[in-house]
Amino acid sequence: MEHTRWQLTEPVRISQGGQPLRSLLQRTWLIPKRLVHYLRIRRNVVVNNQYHPMNHVVQPGDVIQMTFQGDEFRTPTANQYVPTLHSQLGILFENRDLLVVNKPRGQKTHPNDDGETGTLMNDAAGYLGGQAYMVHRIDKQTSGAIIIAKNPVVVPVLDLLIAAGKIHREYLAVVDGFLQGAGQWQWPIGDDPSDPWRRKVDGKGAQRAVTHYQTIVANHDHSLVCLRLETGRTHQLRVHLAHSGHPIVGDPIYNPSSPAGMLLHAAHQQLIVPFSMQNMVIDAPLPDYFAQTLVKYNLEYKNKGDS
């Protein structure tokens, strides 16, 4: 099988110098040990255009070039989505290695069947003119920021940062009723035996689930809440809010009598940029329908990203 090659060139930043090359690759840049092994045995990593052993101490300003032949990655064909022609993504941030895009409500993150089209990952493949790599997902009826990798090298790096809680999203939700204050919910979530599409607190095979919440503004009928996931269970925010007695407005599964159109938006993406390890917050503007609902429900709010 023919593989795609990736060649990444990165400078050593001031804060990253004075350590062995292996430490830079594995501890600072978080490249998995298995990939570093391939770089070493194939001599596919060079410092200032010269091969050095892994114990070579790199200095600020050194230039590291890494070449990946493609067969280092276990699923080389898993990200070949059917590209969308004339793709139009709501791009919030882009660099060599990744995109942060604003997913619209009603669009799936990824296909579930071979050849399926119309998802965000199909759009990303069309925009990139080739492969796109899914890092995480959000529900079809949720809008907002989502990270998409351009190459397989950064996927495990981003996975580690997500697992460590250094990359996360803050969500905004409009919920029923008056939800007061701030806190966290620690209700375990499992399958709902009565419905394969639902999850429930203390359901079958329940796993630890932690959600942090803070009410931004509230009145007798509705509240605008900021939410952050500490764990990432399926439908976690939706299940926790429904169990609290404050289901999300428009949630078709956990609040079916509510008006159509779920009001859950991934508004702020906390991002650690691979290699530079720069910390950024990327804002996804509120959709018009969300902002209009806030006005309708008398929930005054100024988005962090608004000037």
Image: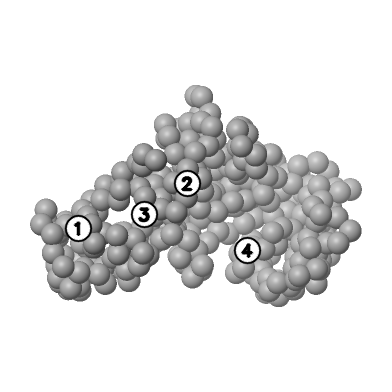
Q: Give the Cα separation between the discs numbered 4 and 1.
A: 38 Å
Q: Give the Cα separation between the discs numbered 2 and 4.
A: 19 Å
Question: Residue 75: percent from the left, percent from the top?
Answer: 47, 50
Element marked by disc 2:
strand
Would you say the residues marked 3 and 1 are in contact, meaning their CB atoms lie under 8 Å apart?
Answer: no
| Of pointers 4 and 1, the one earlier in the residue sequence | 1
In the rendered image, is residue 11 in sight?
no
Disc 1 target residue: 43
Element marked by disc 3:
loop
In the rendered image, is residue 151 in sight?
yes
Would you say the residues marked 4 and 3 are in contact, meaning their CB atoms lie under 8 Å apart?
Answer: no
Disc 4 target residue: 232
Would you say the residues marked 2 and 3 are in contact, meaning their CB atoms lie under 8 Å apart?
Answer: no
Circle 2: residue type: Tyr
User: Taking 279 as reference, is 57 left or right?
Assistant: left
Above or below, 53 relative to 10: below
- Give the numbered dot on residue 133: 2
Q: Residue shown at 53%/37% (left/top)? A: 81
Question: In the image shown, does 293 or 119 lie closer to the viewer?
Answer: 119
Q: Give the Cα separation between the discs numbered 4 and 3.
A: 28 Å
Q: Give the Cα separation between the discs numbered 1 and 2.
A: 26 Å
